[in-house]
Image (cartoon, rainbow, N blue to C red):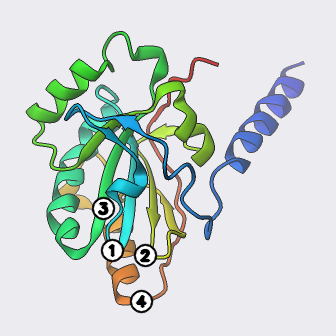
Amino acid sequence: MKQLIKYILFFSLTALCAKELELGSLIPMADVKMPDITGQEIALNDVKGENGLLVIFSCNTCPWVLAWEDRYVDLADSYQSKGVGIIAINSNEKQFNSVDSIEEMQKHAQEKDYNFYYTMDDGSTLAREFGASRTPHIFLFNKEDKLVYRGAIDDNARKPEKVKYPYLADAIDNMLAGKKIDPAATKALGCAIKFIN
């Protein structure tokens, strides 16, 4: 019986992973408007820059987000001026009436000095379309709107000074320079997105 449960769990996880957006895919649902902490309705097409778009599935409370989010701000400082639009998307629908409400998002963003859009994904529709499963879960698109990197920010959430592989920063640098991105996919580490269904 235990062996059967292990197989079921393995194949369920494999099926979930198989839904992750494929490299080379175009930005999904790019015109869907989402409520932003500024009070505006924002779509991915409104955010993308002339050289690309960075989408971060995030939230207010996940310990992995709390460990990494200062790097969101640094990335925005470094790359928005180079034509890379940046947006964080909260898809934790189960918590939209509590710790992940738009009001809590506004407070959190102010406390953490967010310098990029932070939107609420009603119905978790974008997360489902992207195949995002974690917070944080990163998706980087080039100026042709094609996915060129997905996964983690770097290899050490807890100790930024010990990072050996800054996957995302390297991917953006290589994208801007027209060089090959390697690795183009890493494993997203973090809390599970709180889907209702």
- Identify the mark at residue 182; answer none if there is no mark: none
Q: Mark 1 sits on what residue?
A: 50
Q: Judging from the image, what secondary structure is the residue with disc 3 in? A: strand
Of tags 3 and 4, which is closer to the observer?
3
Mark 4–mark 2 distance (CA, rounded to whole Å): 11 Å
* In this view, 44 is above or below 170: above
Give the amino acid at mark 2. Lys
| Corner quadrant of residue 83 | bottom left
Q: Is residue 167 left or right of residue 149?
A: left
Secondary structure beneath disc 4? Answer: loop
Q: Which of marks 1 and 3 is nearer the N terminus?
A: 1
* N-term-proximal mark, 4 vs 1: 1
Query: Is the C-beta separation of discs 1 and 3 under 8 Å?
Result: no
Please name the residue that numbered disc 2 is placed on: 143
- The amino acid on which the numbered mark 3 sits, given as a three-letter code, is Gly
Residue 91: % across, % down:
45, 31
Residue 116 x/y as whole percent: 22, 49
Residue type marked 4: Gly
Please name which of the two marks, 4 or 1, marks the residue nearer to the observer: 1
Say if 165 sits above or below 190 in the image.
Answer: below
* Sequence-wise first label, 3 or 4: 3
Label 1 near label 2: C-beta < 8 Å?
Answer: yes
Q: Residue at x 41, y 57 (%)?
A: 45
Q: Is the Cβ of the residue at disc 4 closer than 8 Å to that at disc 2? A: no
In-front residue for pair 190/99: 99
In the rendering, which numbered label is found on residue 178?
4
Label ID, residue 85: 3
- Quadrant assignment, res 168: bottom left
Q: Upstream in the sequence, badge 4 or badge 2?
A: 2
Secondary structure state at the residue bearing disc 1? loop
**Disc 2 crowd, CA 10 A, few/some/many (<14, 14-19, 20+):** some
